Amino acid sequence: AQSVTQPDIHITVSEGASLELRCNYSYGATPYLFWYVQSPGQGLQLLLKYFSGDTLVQGIKGFEAEFKRSQSSFNLRKPSVHWSDAAEYFCAVGPLSGNMLTFGGGTRLMVKP
Amino acid sequence: EAGVAQSPRYKIIEKRQSVAFWCNPISGHATLYWYQQILGQGPKLLIQFQNNGVVDDSQLPKDRFSAERLKGVDSTLKIQPAKLEDSAVYLCASSLVGVPTQETQYFGPGTRLLVL
C-alpha cells in the first residue's frame, strides 16, 4: 500500500528566509508525486507535480521540489518565503495506474515578520 | 473561468441527524471527487464519479454515506445518520478526464461540518 509521511506538523520561518518542507513516501515503484497548498478557508491548490524526467520540478509561486528515489523523498523548497505563503501544505502520491491519491497529514507553515 | 462551487460552507448538526452537501464542478469536467478531511489529516477520497457513473467508492462508508451525480454535472453527498466522527471538511474536486495521477484536480472551498 502507498503512504505519505510529512514529519513536520508545524514549521515557523521568518519572512525572507529559505524553506524546506519534508515529504517521504512508501510505494513499490516510481510514484507520481504532488504538492498542494491550502490557505485558510480555501480549497487545495496544486503547486507542482512529478511524473518522470528531471528530478527537480518547478512549480507556481516560486516553489520547487526534488525527487530523490534513494531517499524516497520529495521535499518542497522555496529560497525566500513571503508572508502570503503561510498556509498548510500537503504532499500526495499516486500510483502509475488507478485513481487513488494518498495525501500526507500536512505541514502548517507560519511566517514571522 | 468559474471554479468548483460548494454549499453550504458551514453546517452544524446534532448526531443522528441528516445532512447534504452540494457541489458544482468546473464546466466541462467529466470527473468529480468527494474527499473527507478530518482536522489534522490530509484529504481522503470518498468517491469518484466519471460523468454520472461511480468509478471508485471503496472508502465510502455506505451504511451512512451516499452520493449521486444524476445528470453528470453537479453532485450531492449525504450523511444519514451523522456521527460525531463525521465532523470534518468535505471537499469536492473536479478534473477534465479522470486520471488523477496525470492531470490536475481543482478543489472547491469545502463544507465544514460539525456534529454535536
Image: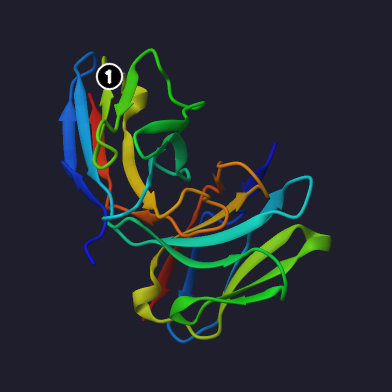
Quadrant that contains the C terminus of chain A: bottom left
Q: Which picture quadrant has residue B54?
A: top left
Describe residue A75's horizontal placement relative to residue A18 as left or right: right
Describe residue A39's horizontal placement relative to residue A57 as left or right: left
Q: Amino acid at mark 1?
A: Ala
Q: Residue at x 23, y 13 (%)?
A: B16
Q: Would you call the spot at circle 1 few (<14 residues within 10 Å), some (14-19), or many (20 or more)?
A: many
Q: Residue at x 57, y 57 (%)?
A: A8
Q: Position of residue A32 (x, y in %)?
A: 64, 56
Q: Position of residue B115 (x, y in %)?
A: 25, 26
Depth order, front residue of B63/B28: B28
Say what secondary structure mark 1 lies in.
Answer: loop
Q: How many marks?
A: 1
Q: Residue at x 65, y 63 (%)?
A: A51
Describe residue A34's horizontal placement relative to residue B72 as left or right: right
Depth order, front residue of A97/B66: A97
- Name the subunit of mark 1: B
Q: Position of residue B109 (x, y in %)?
A: 27, 52
Depth order, front residue of A7/A47: A47
Q: Residue at x 21, y 38 (%)?
A: B22
Residue B45 visible in the displayed image = yes
Read off the residue under disc 1: B82
Q: Is residue A47 above or below residue B88?
A: below
Q: Is residue B51 above or below residue A46?
A: above
Residue B35 visible in the displayed image = no
Quadrant that contains the N terminus of chain A: top right
Depth order, front residue of A23/A111: A23
Q: Is residue B26 above or below residue B13?
A: below
Q: Which picture quadrant has residue B2?
A: bottom left
